[in-house]
Image (cartoon, helix red, strand yellow):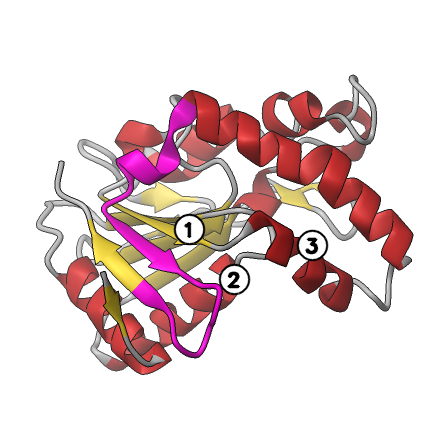
Amino acid sequence: MNQGTRDEVLGHLAEAVGSVTAAHPARVAVDGPPAAGKTTLADELATVLRTRGRDVIRATIDDFLYPRAQRYPRGEYSAEGCYFDTHDYHALIRVLLDPLGPGGDRRFQHAVYDHTADTVLSPPVMTAPADAVLLFDGVFLMRPELIDRWDLRIFVSTTLEKTVDRAVVREGGVSSRADVERRWRERYIPSQRLYYATARPVDHADIVVHNDEPQRPAWERHTH
C-alpha cells in the first residue's frame, strides 16, 4: 500500500486512466460508500485530466435515480430498498455506458433524472470523442449489472462509521442529526454491507483509495 499527498494520489490515478487502451472512451467507475469522498475525488481527477489535455465527461449515479414515488416500495429506511429499488441501471447502460463502450456510437446522455426537482430529464444527446474519459461516481457501481461495463474501477474506501460523521456535517443544514444518523444506520450502512457481501466490490476494483484521511490518502493497485 502506498500513502502520499492528495496530489500524488491524483497523479497516480491520472496515470492509471492514461494507461487504459481502448478504441472507445475510457469508462471509469469511482465507487464507494455514501460520504466516502467519491464525488470530490472524481471532480479533482477530472481537473487533473483536463490539464493533461483529456476530454472528460463527468456524471453521477444521482442522475440515474428512479423518481421518488418509485424508490421506496420497501419503506424509506429499507437497506434492501436502497440496494435494489433506487437506481435505473437499464437507463444508465442504455444512454451512457453502452454508447461509450465497444461498438457504441459515442452518442450519449449524461443524466435521466434531476434529483433536486424529482423530475425526469432528457438532456441533449452529445457525441464523445473516441479518446474521451467518462468519470462516473456513485454507490454500487460494481454490482453484477454494471461490472463488465467499466474500463477502470476505482473504489474509495473509508470506515463506515466515519461516513456517519461526515454525513452529519455535510447535511447539517438540511436535516437533523437524528434523521441523518437514522438514514445512515438503518438504510445506507446496511445496504453497503449487503453490497460488500454479495458483489465484493473491493475484490473487483483495479485501484482502492483509502480515504479516511483525505489529505493523506493511501492507495493500492489490484491485479486480476
The residue at the point 76 percent across, 24 percent down is 70
Within 10 Å of the Cα at label 3, are there few (<14), some (14-19), or many (20+) other Cα atoms? many
Instruction: Residue 206: say if magenta.
Output: yes
How far apart marks 3 and 2 lie (CA) works out to 12 Å
Tag shown at residue 164? 3
Question: Which of the two residues, 61 or 185, is positioned nearer the viewer here?
Answer: 185
The residue at the point 83 percent across, 66 percent down is 172
Labelled pair 1, 3 in contact (Cβ < 8 Å): no
Labelled pair 2, 1 in contact (Cβ < 8 Å): no
Q: Eyeballing the image, is 51 above or below 84? A: below
Labelled pair 3, 2 in contact (Cβ < 8 Å): no
Look at the numbered disc 2 and give the secondary structure of its residue: loop
Q: Nearer the viewer, mark 2 or mark 1?
A: 2
* In this picture, residue 87 sits left or right of residue 24: right
Amino acid found under the numbered disc labelled 2: Gly
Residue position marked by numbered label 1 in the rendering = 136
Query: Of the residues under marks 3 and 2, which one precedes in the sequence?
Result: 2
Instruction: Residue 146: say if magenta.
Output: no
The residue at the point 44 percent across, 79 percent down is 215
Q: Nearer the viewer, mark 1 or mark 3?
A: 3
Q: Nearer the viewer, mark 3 or mark 2?
A: 3
Query: Of the residues under marks 2 and 1, which one precedes in the sequence?
Result: 2
Residue position marked by numbered label 2 in the rendering = 37
Instruction: Give coordinates of residue 79: x percent, y percent.
Output: 69, 27
